[in-house]
Image (tube, rainbow, N blue to C red):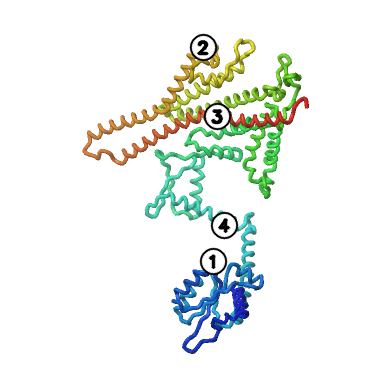
């Protein structure tokens, strides 16, 4: 860069000789007065500001000449793009030179002294450029050699020096991060740590080895029998469980000694995936791909394959592909086409009103849904009804599983108050509302409506009739007897209302009552003792914890009520969207008469 600037200046100086109005280099000087010449490059957009700062600094005792870069070598022109050359002529003085140089350096440009012979400066700059290139070459070669040493495996090890450094820094980071958790007591570090019971002997043995190696002067490992701190949660994991554990921990981690929901997620997550995306073709592809990952795991781990990041989820993909294949068999779906494993139980014919199908006697398709339903006129209505009802039943089962796990946790920790005031209303609400809906679905499936004179009632109408009674009471009656159905609806409505009210207010009321009883007992005890402050810091802390518990209970109840309806809607929407898309694809691609 410096060499290019010097060449540009030299070209302009030779062509224009600083114009007739400027002072030539070396002329007009006397023994008492010497002129100094500084030059360089300045951005075009900063020319006015640059000239104004030079004028103010020198109080007008300097001449600033600006020349645009024109008709130069393309290589030189690229260096000075969007810049102009400046030449400053001023009376030589140390103070003025220092101020002008600072201003020039503020614009990130090199400053060149033109008092010297330009050719001499060019030669000197060329020598400096050659020296810089030589040094850069040496540095580059040395840097490449060092990098090769870093990536080359260390003697006696299969890992490179970079990996050793990485392990060292990670170890040091972990050591100092844990030391910061200790409390300094003079020259000792004191702290609490948690250790699995099964690994206590290993910890003691490791500390003994460090003592023998004189890496630790003295360590006293003492077990605390009665502690008030809440232990952390430790779930033993492996390659198979790890992906499912990551899914569960996205929403939260179970408390110490609570039931691990990952065990159930191993089946429920892939199964629901198969219900939503059940397709024999797609499921077979996923299963084959996951089997490839499982069988070729060792070779893929040592390669740079693009599928290497998926190796962690190979068992998750395997189960998802298996259940997707199973769902495709049940729904007779093969890439959007109906799958005829055996002959259909329906025979089709054409009429002026369209295609229609009749069932052959009491024939039942041996596996899954009869594929002829796809082409029936009411096929979409039937398949949507079946799959949405199946989705509701699966959602109810999963929500009952979650509530049941909460009840078992409360029983294990002997939290009787929370069991009665929180769990029982929640279980009662989900059983009376969703349980009643699931019972209606199963009863409607098992009832032979051809032998009954009335039409089968709508499940949605039956549920709405619980909250709204009117002229359409007969349409929302499943039992047939309107009076009995009205009695059942009133019972269900009252149970749902009482459950919601109990969830919202019973637990906070119990906590306040408990706190009131403790306050009265403390007041009586305080009256029997000498004078003490009315409320200390511990009492304030207990009141804060009380409000936190009440707020947590209220939020938990609201989330449960909202989740009760939103989860049901989620199951419906997921299954409905996936199945409707496949039905539309199948209807548009295939017909038995084409």
In terms of sequence position, does the residue under pointer 3 or pointer 4 come before the other? 4
In the foreground, 298 or 431: 431
Tell me the number on the disc at residue 165.
4
In terms of sequence position, does the residue under pointer 1 or pointer 2 come before the other? 1
- Is 421 situated left or right of 457 in this image? left
Seen at 68% across and 37% down, the residue is: 286
Element under disc 4: helix
- Is 541 situated left or right of 312 in this image? left
Decide: few, some or many residues near mark 2? Use Cα within 10 Å; few <14, some 14-19, many ≥20: some
Placement of the N terminus among the 4 image quadrants: bottom right
Decide: few, some or many residues near mark 1? Use Cα within 10 Å; few <14, some 14-19, many ≥20: few
The residue tagged 1 is 45
The residue tagged 2 is 482
Does the residue at mark 3 contact the one at mark 4 (Cβ under 8 Å)? no
In terms of sequence position, does the residue under pointer 3 or pointer 1 come before the other? 1
The residue tagged 3 is 569
């Amino acid at each position: 860069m410096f060499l290019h600037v010097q060449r540009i200046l030299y070209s302009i100086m030779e062509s224009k000789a600083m114009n007739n109005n400027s002072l030539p280099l070396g002329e007009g000087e006397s023994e008492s007065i010497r002129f100094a010449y500084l030059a360089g490059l300045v951005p075009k957009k900063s020319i006015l500001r640059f000239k104004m700062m030079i004028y103010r600094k020198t109080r007008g005792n300097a001449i600033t000449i600006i020349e645009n870069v024109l008709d130069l070598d393309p290589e030189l022109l690229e260096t000075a793009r969007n810049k102009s050359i400046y030449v400053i002529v001023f009376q030589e003085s140390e103070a003025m030179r220092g101020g002008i140089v600072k201003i020039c350096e503020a614009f990130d440009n090199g400053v060149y002294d033109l008092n010297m012979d330009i050719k001499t400066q060019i030669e000197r700059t060329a020598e400096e450029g050659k020296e810089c290139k030589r040094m850069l070459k040496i540095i580059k070669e040395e840097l490449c050699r060092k990098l090769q040493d870093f990536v080359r495996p260390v003697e006696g090890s299969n890992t490179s020096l970079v990996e050793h450094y990485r392990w060292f820094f990670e170890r040091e980071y972990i050591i100092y991060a844990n030391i910061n958790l200790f409390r300094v007591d003079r020259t000792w570090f004191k702290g609490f740590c948690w250790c699995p019971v099964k690994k206590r002997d290993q910890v003691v043995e490791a500390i003994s080895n460090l003592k023998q190696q004189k890496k630790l002067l003295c360590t006293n490992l003492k077990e605390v029998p009665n502690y008030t701190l809440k232990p952390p949660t430790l779930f033993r994991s492996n390659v198979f469980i790890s992906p499912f554990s990551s899914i569960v921990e996205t929403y939260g981690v179970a408390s110490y000694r609570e039931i691990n929901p990952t065990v159930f997620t191993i089946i429920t997550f892939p199964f629901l995936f198969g219900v939503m995306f059940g397709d024999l073709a797609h499921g077979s592809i996923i299963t084959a791909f996951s089997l490839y990952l499982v069988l070729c795991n060792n070779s893929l781990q040592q390669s740079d394959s693009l599928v290497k990041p998926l190796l962690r989820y190979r068992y998750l993909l395997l189960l998802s592909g298996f259940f997707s294949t199973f769902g495709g068999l049940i729904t007779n779906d093969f890439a959007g086409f109906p799958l005829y494993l055996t002959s259909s139980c329906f025979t089709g014919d054409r009429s002026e009103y369209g295609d229609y199908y009749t069932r052959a006697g009491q024939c039942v398709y041996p596996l899954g849904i009869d594929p002829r339903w796809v082409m029936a006129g009411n096929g979409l209505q039937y398949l949507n009804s079946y799959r949405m009802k199946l989705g509701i039943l699966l959602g109810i089962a999963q929500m009952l599983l979650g509530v049941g796990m909460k009840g078992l946790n409360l029983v294990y920790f002997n939290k009787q108050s929370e069991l009665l005031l929180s769990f029982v209303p929640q279980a009662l609400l989900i059983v009376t509302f969703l349980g009643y809906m699931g019972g209606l679905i199963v009863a409607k499936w098992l009832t032979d409506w051809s032998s009954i004179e009335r039409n089968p009632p709508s499940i949605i109408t039956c549920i709405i009739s619980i909250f709204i009674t009117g002229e359409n009471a007969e349409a929302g009656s499943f039992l047939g007897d309107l009076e009995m159905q009205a009695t059942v609806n009133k019972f269900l409505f009252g149970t749902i209302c009482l459950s919601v009210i109990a969830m919202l207010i019973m637990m906070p009321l119990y906590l306040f009552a408990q706190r009131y009883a403790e306050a009265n007992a403390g007041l009586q005890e305080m009256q029997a003792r000498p004078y003490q402050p009315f409320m200390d810091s511990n009492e304030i802390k207990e009141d804060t914890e009380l409000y936190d518990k009440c707020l947590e209970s209220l939020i938990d109840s609201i989330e449960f009520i909202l989740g009760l309806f939103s989860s049901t809607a989620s199951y419906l929407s997921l299954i409905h969207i996936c199945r409707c898309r496949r039905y539309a694809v199948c209807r548009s691609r295939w017909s038995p008469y084409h």
